[in-house]
């Protein structure tokens, strides 16, 4: 079971530049040590930096991986959700701390430093699969397409990595309108996936047209795979390779 260690650090808070005495008296500091995999080195795993986020990005800090810990200062007393990401040289989050869910940490304030113990572990991040589709002047309903069944396989086609589903009326994100394929159990290993089959179906679950298969080299942990389909009342087609 995880526990918290409390270390009084009033002098440090009071001496911080730009921090008023009132703020120092009520705010606190959070220190989050981290470990990579089974105590592997940053160099072993190609991790350059570690980014920490509290409450899904309300507070963000980043340190060199070799620092071994993140420090958040001037935090109001509260419970915070903490998530860590291990970044490679291309700033891709190839590791994260989400395998065991987001950790909750209590900051007590009053100039106190809270050190999370034991260290939070980072493991390989899954790849993220995105899809988008277009109907020209038609719609999901007019084409009788209710949703898409998605099967992701190892690059050699030998093992199913992920089965998922997206409703045709799912809203896209941003200008490019990609939809994130659900992967609640983090099954989409970026070191393995190399083939994705997409089958449109109607409201009864019957196939509409043929499945489209995309093939590609395994992209690596934390990578994003983006696939596009063009659909009509006969089904959907894609390029066969990611965008």
Image (tube, helix red, strand yellow):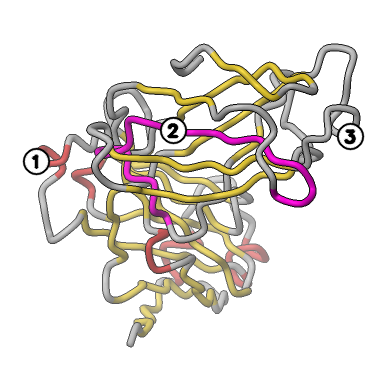
Over which residues does the magenta segment extend? 186-205
* Quadrant hosting residue 38: bottom left
Residue at 73%, 21% in the rendered image: 234
Q: Is tag 3's residue or tag 1's residue first in the polypeptide sequence?
A: 1
Residue 29: x %, y % from top left: 47, 65
Task: Name the residue that disc number 1 marks.
Answer: 44
The N terminus: image quadrant: bottom left
Task: Name the residue that disc number 2 marks.
Answer: 196
- Label 3 or label 2, whichever lies nearer to me, is 3
Q: Are the two marked residues, 3 and 1, in contact with CB atoms closer than 8 angstroms? A: no
Distance Cα–Cα, label 3 vs label 2: 24 Å
Tally of numbered discs: 3
Residue at 47%, 38% in the rendered image: 128
Within 10 Å of disc 1 (Cα), the crowding (few <14, some 14-19, many 20+) is few
Q: Is tag 3's residue or tag 2's residue first in the polypeptide sequence?
A: 3
Task: Name the residue that disc number 3 marks.
Answer: 141
The answer to whether 6 is drawn above or below residue 210 in the figure is below
- Label 2 or label 1, whichever lies nearer to me, is 2
């Amino acid at each position: 079971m995880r526990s918290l260690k409390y270390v009084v650090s009033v002098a440090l808070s009071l001496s911080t530049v730009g921090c008023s005495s009132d703020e120092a008296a009520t705010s606190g500091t959070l220190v989050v040590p981290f470990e990579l995999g089974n105590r592997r080195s940053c160099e072993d795993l190609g991790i350059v930096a570690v980014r920490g986020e509290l409450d899904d990005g309300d507070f963000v800090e980043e340190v060199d991986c070799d620092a071994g810990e993140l420090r958040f200062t001037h935090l109001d007393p509260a419970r915070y959700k903490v998530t860590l990401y291990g970044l490679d040289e291309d700033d891709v989050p190839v590791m994260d701390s989400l395998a065991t869910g987001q950790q909750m940490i209590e900051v007590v304030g009053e100039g106190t430093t809270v050190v999370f113990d034991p260290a939070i572990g980072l493991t390989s991040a899954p790849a993220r699969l995105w899809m988008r589709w277009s109907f020209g002047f038609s719609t999901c309903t007019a084409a009788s397409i209710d949703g898409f069944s998605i099967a992701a396989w190892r690059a050699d086609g030998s093992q199913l990595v992920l089965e998922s589903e997206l409703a045709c009326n799912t809203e896209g994100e941003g200008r490019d309108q990609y939809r994130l394929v659900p992967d609640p159990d983090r099954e989409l290993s970026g070191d393995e996936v190399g083939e994705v089959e997409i089958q449109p179906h109607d409201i009864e679950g019957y196939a509409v047209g043929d499945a489209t298969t995309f093939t590609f080299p395994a992209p690596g942990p934390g990578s994003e795979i983006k696939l596009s389909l063009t659909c009509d009342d006969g089904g959907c087609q894609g390029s066969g390779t990611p965008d």
